[in-house]
Amino acid sequence: MKQLLQMKHLKIITPLIFTTLLSACGNKVQSINTDMNRTENLIFAKGKKIENDNFTGTAWLNSLVDADNTNQNAVGSVTFEPGARTKWHSHPAGQIILALDGVGYYQEKGKEKVIVRKGEVVKCPINVPHWHGASADTAFVQIAITGREKGETVWLEPVSDAEYYGGQK
């Protein structure tokens, strides 16, 4: 009799466990799909994958405005995968970064690394070496507005892992 009651409980509990597991898996799949489709909700298209050695990791650039004689500012949307970042570099006419999505890092030479979040703005001073990119675990999308009237970007050395992960000066 006791064994019969246990079987009856198993018949009731087993479908509940199965339903709970399916529900949990369904939520995880939905979460993964949502993350994968985030690029569909970007303000600007990702653009082209950056293939030069001025970046560590994977990043894309969509050049929105090229500098010319009428307006000497270049404007681009840059999408960084988690862990991706620029080399140390500087701009003879400065730069402004508008954070559109995700979590990023920004650091000027000799200063602590700063966390940059969606909706924040960073003003990069003229000729000050700095780097920027995604945080270690979150993608980052930015608009970079770069003055070109005093020359092109000056690319320096790569950001070391110690600098990236530790924010060392």
Image (spheres, rainbow, N blue to C red):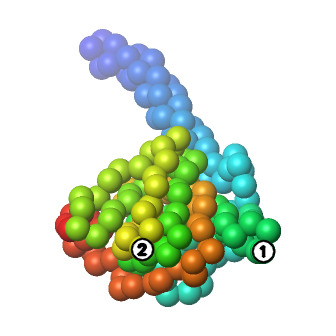
Name the spot of residue 151 as percent of width and height, x first: 58, 81
- Residue at the image position 58 percent from the left and 61 percent from the top: 144
Residue that numbered label 2 is attached to: 127
Quadrant of the rendered image containing residue 3 = top left
Q: Amino acid at mark 2?
A: Asn
- Residue at the image position 47 percent from the left and 28 percent from the top: 20
Name the spot of residue 19 as percent of width and height, x first: 52, 28
Foreground pick, 15 / 73: 73
Q: Left or right: where does residue 130 sit relative to residue 165?
A: right
* Numbered disc 1: secondary structure: loop
Label 1 environment density (alpha carbons within 10 Å; few <14, some 14–19, many ≥20): few
Q: From this view, report whether residue 119 is shown above or below residue 66.
A: above
- Residue at the image position 36 percent from the left and 82 percent from the top: 158
Residue that numbered label 1 is attached to: 69
Asked if residue 131 shows in the view, the reply is: yes
- Mark toward the start of the polypeptide (2 vs 1): 1
Label 2 and label 1: CA atoms lie apart by 22 Å
Q: Amino acid at mark 1?
A: Asn
Q: From this view, report whether residue 85 is shown above or below residue 22.
A: below
Q: Left or right: where does residue 45 sit relative to residue 50?
A: right
Name the spot of residue 51 as percent of width and height, x first: 59, 84
Q: Quadrant of the C terminus?
A: bottom left
Q: From this view, report whether residue 129 is shown above or below residue 132.
A: below
Asked if residue 79 shows in the view, the reply is: no
Q: From this view, report whether residue 119 is shown above or below residue 108.
A: above
Q: Left or right: where does residue 7 sit relative to residue 111?
A: right
